[in-house]
Image (cartoon, helix red, strand yellow):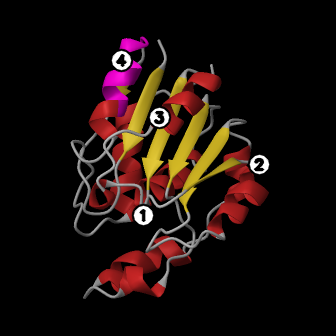
Amino acid sequence: MKRVFIIHGWEGHPDEAWFPWLKTQLEKRGFEVYVPSMPNTEEPKIEEWVPHLKEMVKDPDENTFFVGHSIGCQTILRYLQDINSKVGGVVFVAGWVNLKPEALEEEGAEEIASPWLNNQIKWDDIRQKCSNFVALFSDDDPFVFLSDAEIFKDKLGAKIITLNNKGHIGGEANITELPEVLEELEDMQ
């Protein structure tokens, strides 16, 4: 059976934004869908989030797909670089490698983000684990540089989709449906 793991972002939760809608739509199409609550969401840590995902997925294969939002994308990247199997596909939504200064203004944010920003991502290892990468960005994201799209394209060969006026493409932008993600997952079949 095809499985999809939807990984929320920093301060996120499984019932926010477009996650419930996407879960329902995928289940209607026969997917087994998981939208886990990630640990310590107020202060996400690589050493907590990546093992949590690994424990949930257990045995990844080419019928395993991932959708990440924001720091959830970072979690998926770091998970993929450490596994020894191929997966079916990944859709990154508002994923980032760099963050705008505005994202780090809140007290403690820079300290929390620092390991995610400064610990090297093993792009070559990740690219060997999957041949279907898609990355969605918004042209007015207050936290993510649109130029990060080029990194996903260059390092992973990701298909890039730029949305207009969708903010950080999450709950704060009041986005409750994201058909682009559904379409891309369907195209990966």
- For disc 4, the neighbor class at 10 Å (few under 14, some 14 to 19, many from 20) is few
Relative image position of residue 164 (x, y in whole percent): 53, 58
Q: Hey, what amino acid is under mark 4?
A: Glu
Relative image position of residue 68 (x, y in whole percent): 45, 47
Tell me where residue 146 sits by quadrant. bottom right
Span of residues in magenta: 22-30
Q: Earlier in the sequence, mark 2 or mark 3?
A: 2
Q: Earlier in the sequence, mark 4 or mark 3?
A: 4
Residue, disc 1: 167
Residue, disc 2: 157
**Residue 23 is a magenta residue:** yes
Residue in the image at 29% along x and 47% along y: 17
Tell me where residue 178 sits by quadrant. top left
Q: How far apart are the alpha carbons under marks 1 and 3?
A: 16 Å
Q: Hey, what amino acid is under mark 3?
A: Pro
Left or right position of 158 against 177: right
User: Given this view, does label 2 or label 3 mark the residue nearer the observer?
Assistant: 3
What residue occupies the far front of the structure in this picture?
Answer: 165
- Note whether 128 is above or below 111 in the view shown: above
Q: Earlier in the sequence, mark 1 or mark 2?
A: 2
Q: How far apart are the alpha carbons under marks 1 and 2?
A: 24 Å
Residue, disc 3: 179
User: Given this view, does label 4 or label 3 mark the residue nearer the observer?
Assistant: 3
